[in-house]
Image (cartoon, helix red, strand yellow):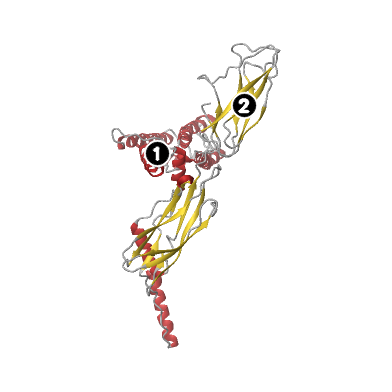
């Protein structure tokens, strides 16, 4: 400030040095606090490495940019265009950080396994996976577990929340605004006095009990057979009451993916919770995960008003497909990832086997192409590219590559074959 107003915007070493030194000192303090705050034996990891590298690189570049404009381009003078460019770096940094955070920069978007519950540590995630395997079977894969967690991303509501929701039902399912209620009451009273007429006000009937769904999101494997939907009630449990329910199609279709369920569920005296079983239909098709809905649509009791909580009357059931399309890879490859091919003086045909493991449901395709290395394309072998087709339950096929006999391959001559773009849920084995 002194340099700006007393020396006509000419900055000497004190100002910039103070700024740079202060920032560096703050950085050291922040790092020290982060280190001291972690207890012995605990570890913290950088969750988004690409975002970290982006912001760290820009932090270093900020100091380099100061050196460039203060000592290089225009010594001891900040020109207007330098200030404008410096200001534009702010939105540019924000944009790059956002692209890194979304996965467009730095290795692509993360898989569903690592998008699920990003705030969990590795130990917590392992515990959750263990609980899911107890419920769905020990053979549940990590991919299926991640998809179940992703489908159940909504946090369960607490019992207190349900009591609050039931209480709100007394006021038409809305929050009570005390100020608005008082103002409205005064206005109505004045209006009645002005027209000298008393209009009776109907008090809303208080439900003796309220039905609700304690879990609003379910996720089950396609081969589970059925899913049990819990229905509960709060209020006066000493009266018999019934609640009407039905299912509704989403991406999962009634009759194909699940059996329609509808009817009345009777709660006897003192009964707080019951379950409705909905049948899940399994098939052998590889398809996307699908979902349908379970709804409470009405309630009744003998001579007493009962109701349904409008905030907890519909559950979403996700059906996780367990028909794996398979993992595609080259077969009979040794530890060096090479497949020996016998050559001859005459032209021969090399057969490169491609196998399909860990599932073979549905028709899948994968593209392939060759690429020269020490073996020369057009001289030692013919370039081929195309698409392999695996029919449902087919687990192996071959790629045919012509080997030219005009020049025999030497011991160390080699070329490459690539698999790309698998379809219909199939994956590529990154190691093979």
In the figure, residue 265 lies in which quadrant? bottom left
Quarter of the image that includes the N terminus: top left
Disc sitting over residue 317 in the figure? none
Secondary structure under the numbered disc 1 in the rendered image: loop
Query: Is residue 81 shown left or right of residue 41?
Result: right
Instruction: Reply above or below: 370 against 243.
Output: above
Q: Mark 1 vs mark 2: which is more N-terminal?
A: 1
Spot occupied by residue 17 in the image (x, y as percentages of width and height): 41, 33
The kind of secondary structure element at disc 2 is: strand
Q: Is residue 339 above or below residue 219?
A: above
Disc 1 residue crowd, few under 14, some 14–19, many 20+, Cα 10 Å? few
Q: Position of residue 149 (x, y in %)?
A: 43, 45
* Front one among 349 and 7: 349
Residue beneath disc 2: 398
Residue 138 marker:
1
In this rendered view, identify the residue nearer to me: 137 or 204: 137
Q: Where does residue 421 sit, x and y in percent of width and height?
A: 60, 34
Report whether residue 150 is seen. no
Quick check: 151 left or right of 27?
Answer: right
Q: Residue at x 62, y 26 (%)?
A: 398
Residue nearer the viewer, 148 or 229:
229
């Amino acid at each position: 400030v002194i340099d700006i107003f007393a020396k006509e915007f000419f900055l000497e070493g004190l100002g910039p040095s103070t700024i740079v030194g202060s920032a560096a000192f703050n950085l050291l303090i922040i790092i020290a606090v982060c280190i001291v705050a972690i207890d012995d034996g605990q570890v913290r990891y950088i969750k988004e490495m690409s975002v970290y590298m982006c912001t760290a690189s820009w932090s270093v570049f900020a100091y380099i940019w100061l050196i460039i404009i203060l000592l290089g381009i225009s010594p001891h003078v900040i020109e207007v265009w330098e200030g404008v460019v410096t200001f534009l770096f702010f939105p540019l940094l924000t944009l790059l950080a956002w692209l890194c955070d979304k996965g467009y920069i730095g290795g692509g978007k993360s898989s569903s396994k690592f998008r699920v519950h990003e705030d969990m540590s590795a130990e917590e995630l392992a515990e959750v996976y263990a609980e899911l395997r107890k419920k769905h079977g020990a053979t549940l894969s990590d991919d299926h577990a991640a998809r179940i967690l992703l489908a159940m991303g909504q946090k369960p509501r607490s019992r207190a929340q349900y009591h609050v929701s039931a209480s709100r039902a007394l006021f038409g399912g809305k929050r009570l605004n005390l100020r608005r209620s008082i103002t409205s009451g005064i206005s109505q009273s004045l209006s009645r006095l002005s027209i000298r007429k008393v209009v009776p006000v109907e008090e809303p009937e208080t439900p003796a009990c309220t039905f609700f769904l304690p879990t609003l999101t379910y996720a089950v494997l396609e081969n589970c057979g059925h899913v049990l939907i819990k229905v509960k009630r709060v209020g006066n449990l000493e009266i018999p009451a019934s609640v009407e329910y039905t299912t509704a199609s989403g991406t999962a279709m009634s009759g194909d993916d699940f059996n329609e369920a509808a009817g009345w569920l009777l709660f006897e005296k003192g009964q707080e919770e019951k379950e409705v079983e909905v049948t899940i239909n399994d098939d052998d098709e590889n398809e996307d995960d699908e979902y349908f809905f379970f709804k409470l649509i009405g309630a009744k009791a003998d001579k007493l008003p009962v109701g349904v909580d409008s905030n907890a009357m519909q559950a979403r059931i996700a059906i996780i497909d367990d028909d794996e399309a398979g993992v595609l890879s080259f077969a009979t490859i040794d530890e060096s990832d090479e497949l020996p091919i016998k050559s001859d003086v005459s032209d021969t045909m090399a057969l490169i086997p491609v196998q399909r493991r860990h599932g073979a449901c549905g028709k899948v395709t994968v593209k392939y192409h060759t690429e020269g290395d020490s073996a020369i394309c057009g001289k030692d072998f013919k370039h081929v590219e195309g698409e392999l087709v695996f029919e449902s339950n087919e687990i192996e096929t071959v790629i045919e590559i012509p080997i030219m006999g005009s020049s025999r391959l030497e011991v160390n001559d080699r070329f490459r074959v690539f698999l790309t773009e698998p379809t219909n849920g199939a994956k590529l084995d990154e190691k093979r």
